[in-house]
Amino acid sequence: MPACSIPTGHNAMFESTAPAEPQWIKQQLRVPRDDETLFARPDLSAVIEDARDNVVQFDRTSIDLAGRTLGQLREWSRKDILQAARQYTAQLTGEPISEQANGLLLVAGHQPSLFHPGVWVKNFAVGALAKSCSGTALNLIVDNDTLSSTQMRVPVGDRNSPQIEMVPFDDERPPQPWEEAKVANGQLFASFGNRVGALMSKWNLEPLLGGMWPDAVEVANASGSLRDALTAARHRQEQRWGCENLELPISRVCELNPFLWFASHLLVELPRFRDVHNEVLGEFRKVNRIRSRTHPVPELSAEHDGWLEAPFWVWRAGEDQRQRAFAKQVGQEIHLSDGKETIAKLPLSPGGEACCAVEALRELPQRGIRLRTRALTTTLFSRLCLSDLFVHGIGGSKYDEMTDRIIHRFYRLSPPSFLTLSATLHLPLAEPFSVSTDDVTRLRRLQRDLAYNSDRYLTDGDNANVDSLITEKQQLIAEQKDATAGNLSRRQRRLRSRRNHDRFRRLREIGASLSELTVERQQQIETESSDVEQQLAANAILTNRELPFCLYPDEKLRSFMTELPVE
């Protein structure tokens, strides 16, 4: 690490001219609806070329980040993070991981939850893309996010009336960061696979979970970590299908020196970063017509005594509640706080090198203090300082419009391109019903028309009284069309008004009489509408794309995940 120094000039980061920033355009990204469909933007066949273009752009960049160029920080990050990833992945598999070629690095990430196939496809995509170019694939386990539930959604019932049952894999607990979560009820955890398998057998399905869960139980018994147990089960299943990605929790990334250098730079430039962050957030909300003050993220606040909110979480080991991080410059130091007390004093001021600040941040874990990224900071670091190409889902892609603007304005760089990827696969429970919301609309309109325009559905000549009522209705409607106020006296207008009222009353009487003749048909339509609505409700479960991937049978997922069109 270079010796600390405080240059007399301004930071070289700000010497370059900011590239032209594209105009805000609201993104129209929609998840695919049809079964076994893939959404990729850009096309997977173009992704490797995009990654190489990103590398060329990074090689041309000479901006300074607290004493290191972005290129130096990227080289450092990749070396340390990949080494840590090999060690962690070896812990998951029980086998040593050899060092891979220094090719392209493709990165994806998600919480260690039992997510749906549209998320899982990212792991197979980065794996296949890395193989196609002799590169490396890395999955970042976002364990700094909150674990809010220890239950999994499982479909039960039958085709006509399917329902979702919440099946627990562990005891409930207050929301807490994933990295702090331990398996609390070993017996409940161990029986989860069998309990879910029994429910799915009623659909004549054998889910992947049956083969995966023994791996989860093995790791849970060894480490007690819920994150590690679920990650090991998923990763080992990917290995069975030939996907050899590296894995690393964000919590471990956040304790490595390259990340601490990145964090130190953000902290020393926090006043400007906060301004850019909040400016971009306001524009994002305006373009997307978002009124919520917390969506997609809250503003970074300014507190009393000069404290500014930083884009990090902080908490102490064993705590359930994450706290916002705050920082302020005090002389030649940056003071860091959890909102209650100062937790660190970093020797760093604008224009200085971050080496001593990194040393101070390295002491936090020894005191049980966690300094972690927020979602936006995670992708900012991953895209700028680590990956050659980052893979987002649709939700992350929408929010990374903000990250692109922050890269433009704060780092004064054209943001590296990324891949947006998702998929839809329906769990093969039963054949969906051939109905749509258009059917409900049509039937409701027909039902209303039968009630108020029954004469349209009655046959002339079947009933003399009906014919008479229809004829009278038509005459009254014709009179109503001819009735105009004109240049009438007050007395004439009163008489006209009375006749209009009598005509309206008579039309209602005729309508009620005719409607009684179609009551049976109206009831039939009501029953048909209810049936269609029930079938639509059933389809919402039968075609639900967000059911956990581990509920799917092997044959449904394997070919889709392992035959992605990457070339």
Image (tube, rainbow, N blue to C red):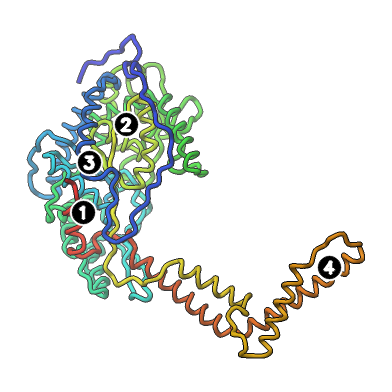
Q: Residues within 10 Å of mark 3 (few under 14, many from 20)?
A: few
The reply to whether dot 3 and dot 1 touch (C-beta < 8 Å) is: no
Of label 3 and label 2, which has the lower sequence position?
3
Of label 3 and label 1, which has the lower sequence position?
3
- Residue drawn at point x = 37 percent, y = 76 percent: 160
The reply to whether dot 3 and dot 2 touch (C-beta < 8 Å) is: no
Disc assigned to residue 415: 2
Q: Secondary structure at mark 4?
A: helix
Q: How many marks?
A: 4
Q: Quadrant of residue 477?
A: bottom right
Residue bearing mark 1: 229
The Cα atoms of the two marked residues, 3 and 2, are separated by 18 Å
Left or right of 25: which side holds 4?
left
Q: Secondary structure at mark 1?
A: helix
Residue bearing mark 4: 497
- Residue drawn at point x = 13 percent, y = 47 percent: 244
Instruction: Indicate the position of residue 95 as horizontal and vertical percent values.
Output: 8, 47
Q: Residues within 10 Å of mark 1 (few under 14, many from 20)?
A: many
Report the amino acid beneath label 2: Pro
Of label 4 and label 1, which has the lower sequence position?
1
Residue 16 versus residue 300 in the image, above or below: above
Report the amino acid beneath label 1: Ala
Report the amino acid beneath label 3: Ala
Disc assigned to residue 556: none
Residue bearing mark 3: 46
Position of the N terminus, as image quadrant, is top left
The Cα atoms of the two marked residues, 3 and 4, are separated by 73 Å
Of label 2 and label 4, which has the lower sequence position?
2
- Residue drawn at point x = 62 percent, y = 89 percent: 461
Q: Is residue 178 visible?
A: yes
Of label 3 and label 4, which has the lower sequence position?
3
Residue 150 versus residue 66 in the image, above or below: below
